[in-house]
Amino acid sequence: MAFVWDASAATAGSLERSLAKLSPEERAHQACAIKGLEAVRRGDKRLAKADRLMPDTFRRAHFDGSVVSAKGAAVRANAHWYALTFECTVSDDQMKALVFTFKLGDEIPPETWEDVGLWR
């Protein structure tokens, strides 16, 4: 399941209920996408208005039990997509991301968006 985190999509209660229904791996991926969107907004001025984060744009993020590593993620801000790599540590129940570190890559050219499932 490719997850696209939309900042306007959920309230806290409905989000927790939705996460609880997922497998541990998918729950971890989504918890990291949620935390990641907050982290990139604070961590890079170009991303202050980021509204989408996709952990699996170029390749599947890896989950090892408590850490999600993504070397092929993407984040959207101001109608621009940027490559992103991140590492995220989750709680034992995978309901919350505890630590999220990232490195912002280059802007992804619009002519390649359709090929990797991105949109305006």
Image (spheres, helix red, strand yellow):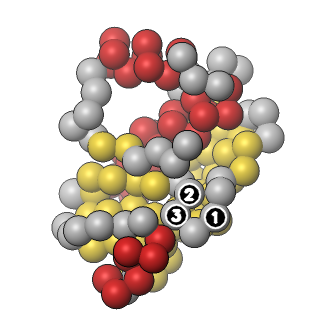
Of the 4 image quadrants, the one containing the N terminus is top right
> Dots 2 and 3: beta carbons under 8 Å?
yes
Judging from the image, what secondary structure is the residue with disc 2 in? loop
Q: Which residue, given by chain and number where applicable, does mark 1 sit on?
A: 59
Q: Amino acid at mark 2?
A: Asp
Question: Horizontal placement of 24 versus 102: left or right?
Answer: right
> Which residue is tagged 3?
57
Please report the residue visible at 73 percent of the width from the left and 43 percent of the height from the top: 63
Label 2 crowd bin: few (<14), some (14–19), many (20+), radius 10 Å: many
**Residue drawn 78% across the image and 33% down it:** 65
Q: For this rendering, which residue is in front, 66 or 19? A: 19
Mark 3: few/some/many CA within 10 Å (<14, 14-19, 20+): many
- Residue 97 position by quadrant: top right
Q: Residues within 10 Å of mark 1 (few under 14, many from 20)?
A: few
The label shown at residue 56 is 2
Q: Cα distance, mark 1 to mark 3? A: 6 Å
Q: Position of residue 73 (x, y in %)?
A: 53, 62
